[in-house]
Amino acid sequence: MSKSLSLFFACLSVLFMSATAISIAHNGWLVLVFSMLTLLSIGAGFITKAKLRRRGNKID
């Protein structure tokens, strides 16, 4: 995975984590929404990394 793509997923996850922390004081539903978005963005980063690694190791 390129460094710029890794940085994108890291910053996106940090933004969602920050939004989760801020929303704790406001609304419980927002906490659930931002928590799910955080988990999805982290998972998407791992999935993207695995797919790019698998695609790079193919021998034709």
Image (cartoon, rainbow, N blue to C red):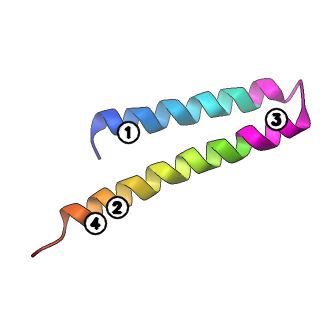
Say which element carries label 3.
helix
- Give the alpha-carbon distance from disc 4 to disc 2, as whole Å: 5 Å
Residue occupied by mark 2:
51
Residue extending farthest to the left is 60
Identify which residue is drawn at 90% across, 37% down: 28
N-term mark: 1 or 2 = 1
Identify which residue is drawn at 44% across, 58% down: 47
Q: Is residue 51 left or right of residue 57?
A: right
Say which element carries label 4.
helix
- Give the alpha-carbon distance from disc 3 to disc 1, as whole Å: 26 Å
- Give the alpha-carbon distance from disc 3 to disc 4, as whole Å: 36 Å
Q: Which mark is residue 30?
A: 3
Residue occupied by mark 4:
54
Residue occupied by mark 1:
6
Density class for disc 2 (Cα within 10 Å; few <14, some 14-19, many ≥20) is few
| Residue stretch rendered in magenta on the structure | 21-34
Instruction: Check residue 37 for magenta coloring.
Output: no
Residue 17 place in picture, x, y as percent: 66, 33
Density class for disc 3 (Cα within 10 Å; few <14, some 14-19, many ≥20) is some
